[in-house]
Each structure stands twice: as structure tokens, then as C-alpha cells.
Amino acid sequence: MYISTSKGRFIIREAVPDDLEQLVHVHVTSWNATYPNHHPKPTPEIRNQQWQQRFANRKENWFCFVAQHEDGEIAGFATGNDFFNSNAPYKG
């Protein structure tokens, strides 16, 4: 899926392990900007390990999508998974 914004054109696609370096950068940068008073701050090394584990142990219902600028830079990501609760009246 492509979207056009005032910042250019972006593609929304599934993340792949080759995105690891950019995912780590976006994750650390956005976390620290969002939570400036949170300590200790996550380091690139910690996030790198976490992302490697996510891709290596990818559960069937886990997903990650990235917003990638037409120049190749990843600007953001979204992760999630199916939700299941046997008490819920629906299958999530």
C-alpha cells in the first residue's frame, strides 16, 4: 500500500529481518522522545537483541508493518498480534 503525504510517498509493508538496523534506530529514537523522563533508557544494543528475538521466534499471529519512505528510510512501525480471550464474545 502506498500513501502520499507532505513528507513524500511511503509504502506500508511487512517488516523483514533486513529492516533490523532501521527498526532499532526508529524504536530507540521514538521511545526516548516519547518518554524523556524514563530511566534507564533503552539502548540500541538492547533493542537490537529484542528485535532479533522477535524475528527469530516469530509467532504465527505476530505482525510488524513499517512505513518506508520512497528513499528507503523507515519512518515508523506498528506491531501487534491476534488477541484471544475465551471469555470474550468474539474472536480477536
Image (spheres, grey):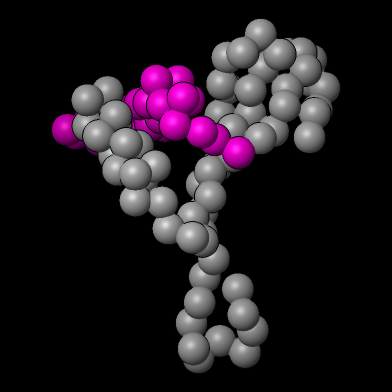
Looking at the picture, does residue 55 appear above or below residue 73?
Answer: below
Residue 90 inside the magenta-drawn segment: no
Q: Residue at x 42, y 58 (%)?
A: 59
Viewer-side residue, 33 vs 91: 91
Point out residue 15 in the picture as x, y percentages from the top left corner: 54, 35
Q: Where is residue 10 in the image (x, y as percent from the top left)?
A: 73, 22
Q: What stretch is highlighted in magenta?
A: 14-41
Does residue 52 appear in the picture of this structure?
A: yes
Residue at image coords 27%, 23%: 44
For residue 37, say whether it is visible: no
In percent of the image, x 59 and y 33: which residue is there?
66
- Horizontal relation, residue 61 to residue 56: left or right: right
Q: Which residue lies furthest to the left in this view?
A: 40
Vertical position of residue 31 compared to residue 79: above or below: above
Residue 23 appears at what percent x and percent y? 44, 27
Q: Is residue 58 above or below residue 3?
A: below
Judged by its main secondary structure, the magenta piece is helix
Which residue lies most toward the top here? Answer: 71
Is residue 77 or residue 16 the one in the foreground? 16
Q: Where is residue 45 shown, x and y percent of the image? A: 22, 25
